[in-house]
Image (tube, grey):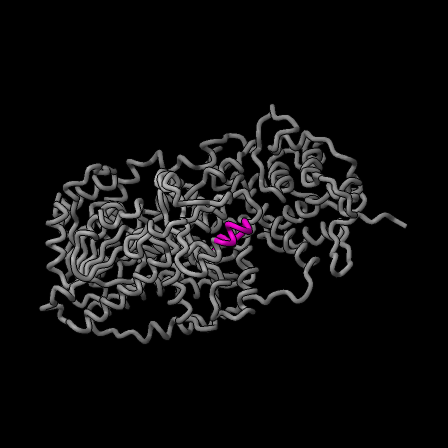
Amino acid sequence: MEKKYIAHINEELKTEQTVKEHSENVAMLAEEYAVERFKKIAYVTGLLHDCGKYQKSFQKRISGSDIRVEHSTCGAIIVKDMSENKSRYPLGILSRMMEYCIAGHHSGIPDGGTTNDYETDPTLTGRLKREFEDFSRYKEELEIPELDEKDFLQFLLSDCDNSEEKVLDKIAFLTRYLFSCLVDADSEDTANFCRVGERPRELKGDFGVALDNVNQRLESFQVETELQKARALLQSQAFENAKTTAEIYLLNMPTGSGKTLASVKIALERVILQKKKRIIYVIPYNSIIDQTAEVFNELFQNNLEILRHQSTFDYENIDEIDEDYKEAAKIAIENWGNTKFIITTTVQFFESVYSNKRGKLRKIHNMADSILIFDEAHMMPEKYLQPCLQAVAYITKYLQSEAVFLTATMPDYLSLIRKYAVTDSKIVNLIEDKSLFKKFQKCNYNYLGEIGEDELLAKSSLCPSSLIIVNTRKAARKLYKKISGKKYHLSTYMTALDRAIILKNIRKELKCLEKEFPDFKNVSEERQITIVSTSLIEAGVDLDVYTVFRELKGLDNILQAGGRCNREGKREKADVFVFELLDSKKKAISVEMDITRDLLKKYEDISDSACIEEYYERIFSLKEDSISQNTMHCICDNFRYIPFKKYAENFELIDSRTVSLVVPRDEKSRQMVADLKYKQTVNERNLQNYTCSLYKNELDDLIKQNVVDDFGTGIYCLTNLDYYDEELGLLFEASDYFL
């Protein structure tokens, strides 16, 4: 009887899956997942990925022997030998891409290494020097098709303007994409074989019905005032221009013009017209997702189920969601498959593209054949701007997706994408005629210059409701303590849960105030509302106050702050006062602040399109070096030695100087901390709503005071709740509130 080589055993069902069966299944799934140009490549990669399981030692292991066996490098060695023997892939690029993927299909794509690496090194070069038991049985069991490497090379060189740097960046991206097809196929086939019981259902979605809902909502809006007419005309212009086929659409619409709803209508129309698989809505902050998801859920009802993928949200914590949906969502989060509408964060999206890890990279192939919406697109981090733009350009050009960039303060992304990503990206400006923008200029921006805290608070005390936004948490706390009357404070020293509760209370109070004083006249001192916040309140937070005071920052910050007042244009103009704190001991100086100060003096209205264009033009001309400093070609010049692992470890969209601290303030969080302490285990996502953010040196100070402990897990928890105040957040001394 011919020997069977086993890949997996389902202990519960007492069934076996052979290496041949698994390899062929993975090959077919990887081929199915890949876009047309990559189908054959993905098939071969899938076919060879587990050839190391033909080793005798692996067969002993799967039969119960307690031995460690490396198998993932063997398939990579097969590809390497084919290339070196010139039997296949003589040019070496395609073979190297496949080697990275196969060798890393368990532990993640490795660094390429150097020619001097030893077999003990964990790099691809080092691992390919290792010797293994005979695994040649694959030659008898697996039929490996030919690949056209010359055609693939022509594709690689296209769109790169003879730039070796652009070719290398493209190879790195496409390697991650190929890896995504492989590892998701591997995970899927293994899960299918090992599953006991029925597979969880897919999340439901009917794009046509969802579009009907959006159209009904748009038709329900009144078109009577000048502002309402301008909003309708701007949206119509965007909808008409979106009929043009492109890869990237730029939707530049002022605050209050209905750009979020417009972007969803455009995405739904494009996804139906182009027969795409899903819509992925990308938002810069976790805090905005809650509000956006609520809006979309209410809009779509049950016709388009939304998958939320963010660090502060876990379906297990939501009691009102049925178990059927929870199971479907938990599976969909792993790879973004089996769902039609995803809301996620900028961090989740781009760190999934630039990771080297199996778990994160599984998602990339499901970014293909999709419509991507980037809300507040101007907030892409400048020091990672080139890799972010490259990712969007590659996904839209090579993976058959389309993207919509959405913002009220649009940089010249058309030029930036063509300069830093793909030269011939097909880009369409959805708003060509900006003459109606003036209708949405609902604020006077006044520059106060340097001002003391007491004078600032005296000015804010004259307003029925005011929002004071400052650049540091320390300044916010100091101002808040000085304010008398009804006041609110927001900063990331507070937990996400407390911030959400306070925002809810603020909205309620503002509505009551407007109802009681519709003309905002004769508001008594005890009814006035003052909110002090850091910049977390600027982007996407639905608030409408009477007057905004904004400490000098970048122009985009100031205009975003302006969007927190007079949102519906009920008054002809509201006031936004820009100030610099006089007694700020360490005045932070930045290029953005210097340019904004100049523009405040130069332009009567800084929300004017010409002002915004000048701002970004000056910013990007001064910061040209930093835009591309974190791109792969800056640390590597040879495709054979791409440092995938090193690059992924250093790719941090969030400031790495900050850390999270768990504050257990209710029974649920206290139980989770107890599990962490005594069982050394916890679902970290469940803890996110109970975390606040602080600098590493601040954490060290609290550790010295013996009020923080990680119980040996690396997850830090506040153990003395005297160091937390629900109004101020984290305190650095127990008596800090009174200082």
Predominant secondary structure in magenta?
helix
Tell which of 95 and 444 is nearer to you: 444
Quarter of the rendering containing residue 529: bottom left
Quarter of the rendering containing residue 89: top right
Magenta stretch: includes residue 715 = no
In the image, is 613 to the left or to the right of 524?
Answer: right
Residue at image position (35%, 47%) is: 413
In the image, is 502 to the left or to the right of 682?
Answer: left
Residue 122 visible (yes or no): yes
* 513 in relation to 587, above or below: below
Tell which of 55 and 94 is nearer to you: 55
Residue 157, image x and y in percent?
52, 38
Magenta stretch: includes residue 680 = yes
* 144 in relation to 164, above or below: below
Tell which of 488 and 105 is nearer to you: 488
Residue at image position (70%, 47%) is: 47
Residue 732, image x and y in percent?
31, 44
Magenta residues (range): 674-685
Residue 405 visible (yes or no): no
Residue at the right extreme, as displayed: 1
Residue 58, image x and y in percent?
76, 42
Residue 699, image x and y in percent?
38, 41
Quarter of the rendering containing residue 214: bottom left
